[in-house]
Image: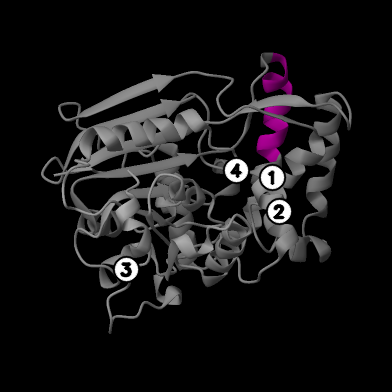
Amino acid sequence: MRDSSLAAQAHLIIPLAGKPSNPQDADHGNFFKASTYDEAYWDDYMAARAKYSSDFYDRIFTYYNAHHDASSQTQAVAHDIGTGPGQVAAELCAHFNTVIASDTNSTHLAVAAARLARAGLKDRVTWTPSGAEDLANQYPPASASLLTVAECLPLLDVPRAMTTFAHLLQPEGTLAVWFYGRPAFSEPEFAATCQPILNEILDLTFEKAIKGSSPVHKAAWKSAADTLESFLDDVHLSPDVWRDIYRYKWNPHLPMPVSGPNACDYPIEPSSNIDPQTEKVIEQDDPQFWAESWDVDEVRRFVECLIPIFAEKKAKGEYEHVEPKYLALERAMGGKEAKRAFTWPVVLILATRK
């Protein structure tokens, strides 16, 4: 994928002139946006999130290499959409000379750039403030050979985003979309006793944000919940546009939405747009997938890092009613220092642009 002749062209693909994108215009009720650069928050955020394994990335790159013609004159360009703190963009830099990272939130881009600067990678990346749905206004058709869309598609206007992805990809280019849901206790005895408490904690944490949100934000919550409950099966990949479609699912028996029906005042309605004639679905139950070992404080860190303004609201006493549940979870886990095994529900969609 990397070609030394491209090294000097690391910023060759630049946004189209005259078509600025306002990140605020791209906010379709995106409730996970961070508005301030708090280094401590992002350190905790990264420590609390799932760690993408090398074999997971290898699956994506193997698929990409099987479809991309390395001998063609088409430039190999990887574009990480919704880059967040930039961990995927950093991985792409190891495989591509030309990398783009875009995000609707300028704070996310600042965090990603600072983190990649520590690894000497900041100048290897073209940074683009734009919502995913608006990237067609920023980049010409066929401007990328690989699109990575990690942990953000359900938060977007999915039909518009999919149209944009088709616009951005070169013919035979690869789309890689993935999402992971709430962590799950993987040891059966603790799954039975501890998981219900964790689910209550998540519901209580998100209930006020969901039920008290504006109509725009509530519509976004519902859209995301429907897609996550569907394990992204409702994401339509038209056979007129896409081929060689694979949907890999790890631990599909586990719930994907971060909160459940008790946190919502709307129905969660899963659906499917899978075409069995053109798509392959591969499912695997694997309690060791992206395995973590956490104590109760590390579980708390995961929950509290899900919402960027959580610390501010917690300081005002808005989450005191959740504290008894953490004490119950601590007891069920075997004490404050006890570590328990966790895994994740994960879905990865791979597709080739016709």
Q: Which mark is residue 134?
A: 3
In whole angstroms, how far apart are the C-alphas of marks 3 and 4?
A: 34 Å
Look at label 3 and name its amino acid. Answer: Asp
Query: Residue 354 location, x and y as percent?
Result: 13, 44
Residue at mark 3 to residue at mark 1: CA–CA distance: 31 Å
For residue 338, side relative to residue 53 (left or right): right
- The residue indicated by pointer 4 is 262
Q: What is the residue that sits farthest to the front in this orientation? A: 5
Question: Label 2 to label 1, Cα distance in Å?
Answer: 6 Å
**31 is higher (above) or lower (below) than 322:** below
Q: Is residue 102 shown above or below 175?
A: below
Q: Nearer the viewer, mark 3 or mark 4?
A: 3
Name the front one of labels 1 and 4: 1
Q: Quadrant of residue 77?
A: bottom left
Magenta range is 189-200
Residue placed under numbered mark 2 in the picture: 43
- Say which quadrant the N terminus sits in: top left
Colouring scheme, one of rainbow, by chain, secondary structure, one colour: one colour
Q: Residue 3: give x, y in percent of width and height.
A: 32, 48
